Amino acid sequence: MSTTAKCPTGLRAGGQKLWKAIDADHELDAPQLVQLEEACRAKDRLDQLDDILAGRGVLELLHFRSMLTEYGEDERHITVTVDGVLAQANTTANLMKQLLAALRLPDEQSGKKPQRRGPRGVQSPSVPGGKAGKVSSLDRARAAKSG
């Protein structure tokens, strides 16, 4: 259906699988390819975080601390702590979900693309004067005079 783009270097198995699955079925433009690459990197990070949560951790992500015993002996104990891995996994999963949604891939059954929605920004004022719920005496006088 489409010309496939080259899979980025540095992706691990999960990221490569995601790239191939999406790129093979969809014609992606340059911004979508960037979003897909970031989603694939997020997938790889999620796989690493899942390994840590399952006890197969990646040592670079662990914090090691050496402590002396209470008695001042020269024995050293190593305490391994994993800080915020579950929270980081949840944040990364949300990021990946947002990146994939931003690709606006068509629905498989209907073939329709999701609506493009702009960022939410400043809303127009709901009352004269621009402050919702607060009307100045000047605004009340103007309203009374006009109608």
Image: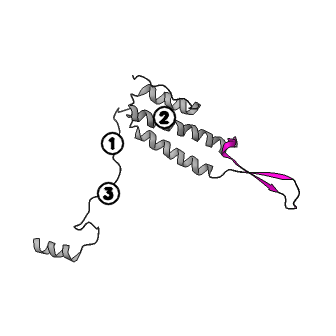
Element under disc 1: loop
> Disc 3 and disc 1: Cα gap in Å?
18 Å
Q: On the image, which quarter does residue 9 sit in?
A: top right
On residue 122, the disc is 3
User: Horizontal placement of 131 versus 107: left or right?
Assistant: left
Image quadrant where one finds the C terminus: bottom left
Q: Earlier in the sequence, mark 2 or mark 3?
A: 2
| The furthest residue to the left | 146
- Regarding residue 7, the answer to whether it shows in the image is yes
Q: Label 1 belongs to which residue?
A: 116
The front one of 81 and 76 is 76
In the image, residue 76 lies in the stretch drawn in magenta: yes
Stretch in magenta:
56-81
On residue 37, the disc is 2
> Disc 2 and disc 3: Cα gap in Å?
31 Å
User: Horizontal placement of 7 versus 13: left or right?
Assistant: left
User: Horizontal placement of 79 versus 44: left or right?
Assistant: right
Residue 1, position in %: x, y? Answer: 39, 22
- Regarding residue 147, the answer to whether it shows in the image is no
- What type is the residue that disc 2 sits on? Glu
On residue 30, the disc is none
Label 2–label 3 contact, CB within 8 A: no
Q: Earlier in the sequence, mark 2 or mark 1?
A: 2
The front one of 53 and 38 is 38
The residue positioned 51% from the left and 29% from the top of the image is 8
Label 2–label 1 contact, CB within 8 A: no
- What type is the residue that disc 1 sits on? Arg
Element under disc 3: loop
